[in-house]
Amino acid sequence: MGESIRIGIAGYGNLGRGVEAAVAKNRDMQLVGVFTRRNPAELATLHAETSVNTMDDLAAHEDRIDVLILCGGSKEDLPQQGPVMAARFNTVDSFDTHARIPEYFETVDAPARAARKTALISAGWDPGMFSINRVYGEALLPDGDTYTFWGRGLSQGHSDAIRRVPGVAAGVQYTLPSEAAIEQVRNGSRPQLETRQKHTRECFVVLADGADPASVREAIVTMPHYFDQYDTEVHFITADELARDHSAMPHGGMTIRSGNTSDDHAQVIEYGLTLESNPEFTASVLVAYARAVHRLNQQGQFGAVTVFDVPPGLLSPKSAAQLRAELL
Amino acid sequence: MGESIRIGIAGYGNLGRGVEAAVAKNRDMQLVGVFTRRNPAELATLHAETSVNTMDDLAAHEDRIDVLILCGGSKEDLPQQGPVMAARFNTVDSFDTHARIPEYFETVDAPARAARKTALISAGWDPGMFSINRVYGEALLPDGDTYTFWGRGLSQGHSDAIRRVPGVAAGVQYTLPSEAAIEQVRNGSRPQLETRQKHTRECFVVLADGADPASVREAIVTMPHYFDQYDTEVHFITADELARDHSAMPHGGMTIRSGNTSDDHAQVIEYGLTLESNPEFTASVLVAYARAVHRLNQQGQFGAVTVFDVPPGLLSPKSAAQLRAELL
């Protein structure tokens, strides 16, 4: 193994904390430090020895970080940070607003190219590993259909939505895939599935003092886009129950390609994730891609790239010869 | 879409026939022809319009084939053909003798490099798609274990083995994964599994006239390496039943990575295939990689490569921008 890869973390929420944990699991990497907009003195990191700095300190670290992992959010942070950081560092991020990926790619590509940096955008599991499997699925079975199911998992966006309903003190929302729909897809029948047939939604809600359960339930299940196209169950629980039973961030799902190689033969490819911690797994994906980005940059591949551009072997600390001998 | 990719098929057994079917499913490809050691006049192809030629005719086609797909066997054909063809064509093959892959890689790499050709070896599903998922799994969850299960599927090697037992007129063998073992792995417990716990074997045998069932059964279940380390069931059937119920070539399996991103959180990644036709699916993989090989060669990447060296996006007929917009 060569020199170790020096990683910086920009932003320290659940994802940044996950990256700190993931770097420790990779022996060819070292963590230079966390860079935050908060007061470093008030940040409690996972490992006591982790160096905590302000974002302004990044300027002094430009030559000491091989890859900077951007752990901010897709709505506010990354559209601003991505292009700025790609002009100064090799970067990896998890930009996940699917509809705006082409536009975001362009804003990162130009500064990265100009600075001879490599910026991998939209890594994680969806976008990320699920996307890779959608591409493989289409390419291997061109006469076919792709199905993506999410869950069982905690949805941050839908949890935020129910917390905005008047009368709701707190709450979480889980997305559940329909087992019946999955079975139909797995058996190769290539069904046409409506939104309502693929997923259901389950809410656990703590009512505000004096709120009426029936009207809160009605407000949730009829909420446009978020819930009205789904079958939704609402359960009322206490604040204690919420804290005890719903603090974890599980998620997962599967992407299935069902296709025919001939009239006689159906073929089914399935890729599934069962995650006890969504942010920790996403972080692990970012860290593996940081290794690839470091190598792509060394090979002279500059500009913005995505998971579609990265050969699988570049994610591994093992050499190409070792991979052929051990894993092919 | 640019010009179509011109494909040649060297060898016409089940795999070559599968490639003929797969090329027809890809609109950016055209089949130049099949090249065979048999008498072309006696070859019945899938499509009447397919051109059938002798292997000697390949010389006249060197400028008319973008990628030659080698459909011979790993034991006799490819060790001889692979290096010879890689000096004349871009090639894709399904060399699947895992232990000899490093040596085979070297014998193909030198002539391909010298001729500025690109030769992708060992594509298919194992080696191939399963290998890719073993690499992704290790890289994403370095603190983890990888499990591969095969089946339910027809095993050619084990079917050949039972047909060599005295008293056996004909027969087939299916490999079955243990559902109990799969459940243990799926729940993240990272079990240590013995060979006998992971798979069982099921044989359907037609007895030769006058053969003794008990001694045939005993000879099969005690056969070293092939059956003695497994729990094996032997069913005796008629030649008619064998022809009616056991002519298909289903296969599949799964590779599972189970790992921890922290002491508190287990994560499970699963990639599974359910194949009604093993050779047709393998052929579809070879054809998708033929597209990638054509592009790698145009990019100037010469020599032997494997699936580990190919970015997922190169398998797709879609452009990088289209993939980002539609599938990321």
Image: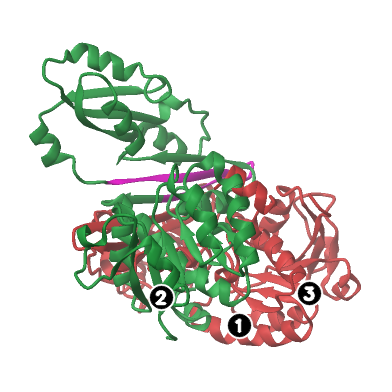
Chain colours: A red, B green
Viewer-side label of 2, 1: 2
Q: Is residue A314 located in the magenta-colored stretch of the structure?
A: no
Name the residue tied to disc 3.
A89
Determine the image quadrant of residue B300. Answer: bottom right
Q: Which residues are magenta?
A: B250-271
**Nearest to N terminus: mark 1 or mark 3:** 3
Q: Nearer the viewer, residue A29 or B255?
A: B255
State whether residue A132 is above or below residue A239. Answer: below
Residue B6: image tag: 2
What is the secondary structure assignment of the residue under circle 2? strand
- Measure the alpha-carbon separation of dots 2 and 1: 33 Å
- Measure the alpha-carbon separation of dots 3 and 2: 42 Å
Q: Nearer the viewer, residue A104 or B286?
A: B286
What is the secondary structure assignment of the residue under circle 3? loop
CB under 8 Å between discs 2 and 1: no
Q: Is residue B68 visible?
A: yes
Name the residue tied to disc 1.
A105
What is the secondary structure assignment of the residue under circle 1? helix
